Amino acid sequence: MTLTTRPRGTNDVGPGQIELWHELEERIRRVCAAYGYQELRTPMFEHTELFQRGIGEATDIVEKEMYTFQDRGERSLTLRPEGTAPAVRAFLEHNLGSGSLPVKLYYFGPMFRYERPQAGRYRQFTQFGLEALGSGDPLLDVEAILLPLELYKSCGLSGFEVEINTIGCPNCRPGYRQELVEYFQPRVERLCSSCQNRLHRNPLRLLDCKVESCQEVLAGAPEITKHLCGECSEHFAQVLAYLDALGVEYRLNPRLVRGFDYYTKTVFEVTSQELGAQNAIGAGGRYDGLVEELGGKPTPAVGFAVGVERLLLALQGQGKLQPEPKGPSAYLIHFGGDTKLKAAQVAHFLRGQGLWVELDYLDRSIRAQMKAANRLGSRYAVIFGEEELSRGRLMLRNMQDGQEQEIDLEDLKQLAKILGECGK
Ligand code: HAM
C-alpha cells in the first residue's frame, strides 16, 4: 500500500471521464421521468441483517463479498452491496405503499462487493437501479426491461442481448430444487468444488457455473418448465407475450439463475458483446416475497440494475457517448498588478452571468497566457492592456478568426452578451 495508490478494485473518475458520467446521468433522469420513476437516495451502509435476510445467507454476496464492520456503538453495519434490499427497507420505513401503487423508484450510486477485481468487475462500482413495488402485473416486468433498453439505445449502444427465464415461486421451486439435487448427486464428483459446496444449500446456482467440467454435467440437467405452477407459467407466458407485442428481442435461457434468494418468477439479464467475461450490463427480476420477508405486507415487486462502469466500457468500445469537448467562453489576459485586479473584477462579473471564464494565476507571460487560452479551447481572449484600460476599454479577440474589437469597460453587459451568444 502507498499513499498515492487507490484501494484495489476502486476507480477515480476525473476530467475526461466525468463528462461521460454527467451525460449518462442526464439520460437516466430523462428516461426515468418518461416511465414515472422517482429518485430514491438511501445510505451507503445499512444494518448487516438487512442484507442477510434480504439477499439470503447462502448467497456468495452474503457469505463472501460484504464489507461488514462494527461501528463504535458495536452495531454491525454493511456497505450496501446492492440497492434492492435498501429500497424495500425505505419503502417500508416511510410507508410508501400507503399511496398510489405501484411505487416506482430509481437510484444511482456506489455499491460495494469484495470480489476479485478484473476488467468490468470492481469492489466499488456504480449501479443505476429501478424498483416497482405494489403490483404483480407482468407488464411491469416488461417495463423493468424496456426502461434500461431505452437507456442503452439512447446512448447509441448496439450489440446487446436480453436473456430471460423464470425461476418459479415458493410453491413450485422446491420440487424443481429436489429434482436438481437428485440429478447432480450421482454426478457430484464431476462438479467443481464450489458447486459441490452449493449442491444442497443452493442447487439452482449450479445452473450458471462457468467451469468447463460443470458445463458438461449441466447440459443434461432438468429444466424448470415442467415444475412451474399454473400461476408462474401463466405469468411467464404473459411476460413473453408483452415482449413480443412490444417488439423486444430476447433469448430464453433456462440456465439463467441469479445470485440472490429474493427472486421469484421472472429473471433477466442483458449482456453486451463488447465486454469480456464480465459481460452483464444489467440484470434484475421479480421479487414478490421480499417486502414480506423484511416485515411488510405481501407486496409483489420487480426491478433491474445497470452496472454503470460496464455500460460505459461497452459504450467506449463502440466509440459512443462522446460529449463534445467544451472550453471557456473567454480567457482574460492580464499583465499583473492593476490589470490583474481589473481582470479579477471582470471575471467575477462574467461568472455571475453564468459564463465560464478563465484567467492566469501563475504570473505567466502574455504569450504563455495565449497558449493556455488555446489549449483550453477558449473561444475568446479578453486582453487587459494598460493602454486600453487607460482609455476605459478592453480588447476582445476571437480565437478562431483572430478578429479583434474594443469593448467599453463600463458596458460589461455587452461583453457578456457577445460571450453568451457564441456559447449557444
Ligand atoms: P446484480 O446482477 O448483482 O443485480 O447487479 C446488477 C449489475 O451491476 C450487473 O449486471 C453488473 O452490470 C453490475 N455489477 C455487479 N457487480 C459488479 C461489480 N463487482 N463490478 C462492476 N459492476 C458490477 C443486483 O444487484 C440486483 N439488486 C438487481 C435488481 C434490482 N434486481 C431487482 N431489482
Image (spheres, rainbow, N blue to C red):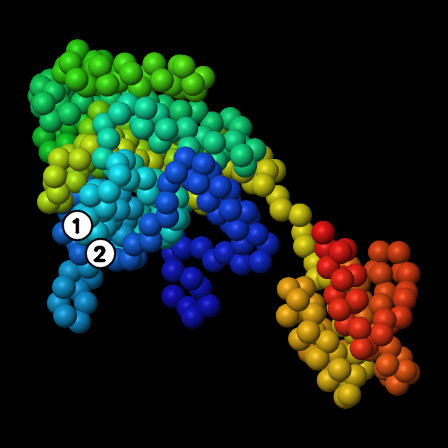
Numbered-mark total: 2
Image quarter for ligand 1 equals: top left
Q: Residue most toward the bottom? A: 337
Judging by the rendered image, the residue that carries numbered circle 1 is 50
Would you say 206 lies left or right of 112 here? left
**Which residue is drawn at the image coordinates 25% and 57% (left, top)?**
45
| Residue 152: percent from left, percent from top | 49, 34
> Does residue 366 appear in the picture of this structure?
no
Residue ID at (70%, 62%):
328
Q: Residue at x 53, y 34 (%)?
A: 154
Report the amino acid beneath label 1.
Leu
Residue 29 position within the rendered picture, expressed as x and y whole percent measured from the top left? 46, 44
Q: CA distance from mark 2 to mark 1?
A: 7 Å
Q: Are marks 2 and 1 in contact (CB under 8 Å)?
A: yes
Residue 374 location (% of width, % of height): 78, 62
Q: Is residue 207 left or right of residue 32?
A: left
Circle 1 residues within 10 Å: few <14, some 14–19, many ≥20: some
Residue 363 lies, in percent from the top left, at 74, 81
Q: Amino acid at mark 2?
A: Glu
Label 1: element kind: helix
Q: Please identify the quarter of the rendering in which residue 146 is found.
A: top left
Residue found 38% across the figure and 66% down from its top: 1
* Secondary structure beneath label 2: strand
Q: Which residue is mark 2?
A: 46
Q: What numbered label is drawn on residue 189?
A: none
Q: Is residue 368 left or right of residue 127?
A: right
